């Protein structure tokens, strides 16, 4: 059984969505986390994440942390759902690239923007990030063309939480609107506070 360690309205909500998209059997264990934006919460001793954060996923005694790793783990575990290209698929390389880009470029850039600590190099990185995403979404509905994937979930979950962190381009709003019609997202949001 998959166990998602979850804090409502946090980065773990994206994995409620992914698990619902996958049709995977899972249970949720709600844990408390420290939230810097409200200076609330605390580390929960029931949370196995080494930093007391979420998401954390436990699968038959194996702990997986970090969003990109969890997304890859789950899409590899449930290949039939088609949310992550398998080894040998021509879209596998772009999929892995988007997962790594999310973790290595988008999140750090957005955190620096949010904390108002961007230097000139951060500003160039942020502009390049915006250009890459915008150009991709101007030519296709999803990051992998016509194929919705777990990479879309990672990026879109940021827009759901903080739309203002990316520039006001219609392609981002349209991307968010397309994702918002997915039944699995509605089911996940209903479970977010449950």
Image: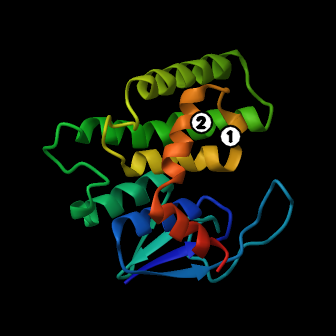
Pointer 1 with pointer 2, Cβ within 8 A: yes
Q: Quadrant of the N terminus?
A: bottom left
Q: Which residue is mark 1?
A: 163
Q: Which residue is found at the position 67% from the left and 69% from the top?
A: 8
Left or right of 163 in this view: 82: left
| Element at label 1 | helix
What is the number of callouts on the image? 2
Q: Quadrant of the C terminus?
A: bottom right
Residue farthest along the right direction in this orientation: 39
Q: In which quarter of the view is residue 120 placed?
A: top right
Task: Report if residue 155 is visible in the image.
Answer: no
Which x, y percent locates residue 104? 51, 38
Placement of 111 over or under 8, stated as above or below: above
| Element at label 2 | helix
Of pointers 1 and 2, the one earlier in the residue sequence: 1
Residue farthest along the front direction in this orientation: 181
Mark drawn on residue 173? 2
Q: In which quarter of the view is residue 169 placed?
A: top right
Report, in whole angstroms, how far the alpha carbon at label 1 lies from the one at label 2: 8 Å
Foreground mark, 1 or 2, reads: 2
Residues packed near mark 2 inside 10 Å, few (<14), some (14 to 19) or many (20 plus): some
Q: Which residue is found at the position 56% from the left and 43% from the top?
A: 176
Which x, y percent locates residue 5? 55, 75
Placement of 168 over or under 3, stated as above or below: above
Task: Report if residue 37 is visible in the image.
Answer: yes
Placement of 136 over or under 32, stated as above or below: above
Left or right of 61 in this view: 91: left
Q: Which residue is found at the position 70% from the left and 44% from the top?
A: 162
């Amino acid at each position: 059984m998959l166990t998602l360690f979850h804090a409502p309205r946090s980065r773990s909500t994206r994995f409620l969505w992914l698990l619902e998209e996958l049709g995977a059997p899972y249970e949720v264990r709600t844990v408390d986390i420290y939230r810097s934006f409200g200076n609330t919460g605390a580390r929960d001793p029931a949370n196995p994440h080494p930093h007391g954060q979420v998401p954390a996923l436990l699968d038959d005694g194996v702990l997986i942390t970090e969003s990109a790793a969890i997304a890859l783990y789950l899409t590899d575990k449930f290949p039939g759902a088609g949310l992550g290209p398998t080894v040998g698929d021509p879209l596998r390389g772009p999929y892995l690239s988007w997962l790594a880009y999310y973790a290595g470029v988008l999140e750090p850039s957005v955190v620096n923007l949010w904390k108002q600590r961007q230097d000139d190099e951060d500003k160039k990185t942020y502009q390049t990030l915006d250009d890459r995403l915008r150009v991709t979404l101007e030519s296709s509905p999803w990051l992998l063309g016509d194929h919705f994937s777990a990479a879309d979930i990672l990026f879109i979950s940021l827009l759901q939480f903080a739309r203002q962190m990316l520039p006001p381009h219609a392609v981002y709003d349209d991307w968010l609107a397309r994702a918002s019609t997915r039944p699995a997202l509605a089911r996940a949001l209903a479970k977010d506070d449950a």
